[in-house]
Image (spheres, helix red, strand yellow):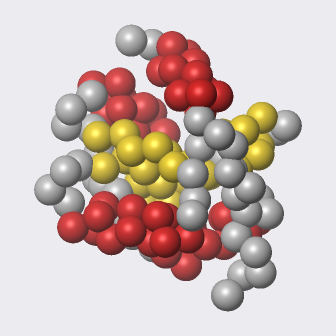
Amino acid sequence: MTMKRWLFLCAALIALAPLPANAIVCDGKVKPVVVFRTAWCPYCLYLERFLDDAGVLYMKCDIEKDTVCADALWRLTHQGGVPATLVCREYVLGADIESIQMLLYRYGQYGTYGE
């Protein structure tokens, strides 16, 4: 599966779901936050719990179950470590909640930074 096809499938999945008020809008298009993860990674679960609690629309991309996810992670970061979070065109390596909050705030989807 090509990267273009993968992004198309992501967009299709998001289009089927009701759009929450805190969806990320980048370049005039709704884009999900993408969390590159593995099922066994405790930091990935910590990050997902934060996003769930914050009500952020995100997509899990398991690099062990889906080679497209692994390829996308490598192309994006030139690394294979998880978690990695993609917000619009920017990524954060690790479960760096403060950096992710700053990106969400930058795209107007996290209220006032530091809340």
In which image quadrant can residue 96 be found? bottom left
In the rendered image, the residue lying farthest to the bottom is: 115
Viewer-closest of 64 and 79: 64
In the rendered image, the residue lying farthest to the right is: 28
Pinpoint residue 74: horizontal percent, then vertical percent.
38, 37
| Residue name at image x 67 percent, y 87 percent | 114
In the rendered image, the residue lying farthest to the front is: 18
Q: Is residue 86 above or below residue 29?
A: below
Pinpoint residue 37: horizontal percent, then vertical percent.
30, 50
Q: Along the horizontal axis of the image, is 112 left or right of 55?
A: right
Pinpoint residue 31: horizontal percent, then vertical percent.
66, 40
Q: Is residue 39 above or below residue 113?
A: above
In which image quadrant can residue 45 be found? bottom left
Q: Is residue 64 above or below residue 9?
A: below
Q: Along the horizontal axis of the image, is 110 left or right of 17?
A: right
| Residue name at image x 59 percent, y 43 percent | 32
The answer to whether any part of residue 7 appears in the image is no
Q: Along the horizontal axis of the image, is 3 left or right of 113?
A: left
Q: Quadrant of the C terminus?
A: bottom right
| Residue name at image x 57 percent, y 64 percent | 55
| Residue name at image x 39 percent, y 62 percent | 48
Q: Quadrant of the N terminus?
A: top left
The answer to whether any part of residue 57 appears in the image is yes
Q: Is residue 108 above or below residue 14?
A: below
In which image quadrant can residue 22 be found? bottom right
Pinpoint residue 108: horizontal percent, then vertical percent.
79, 63
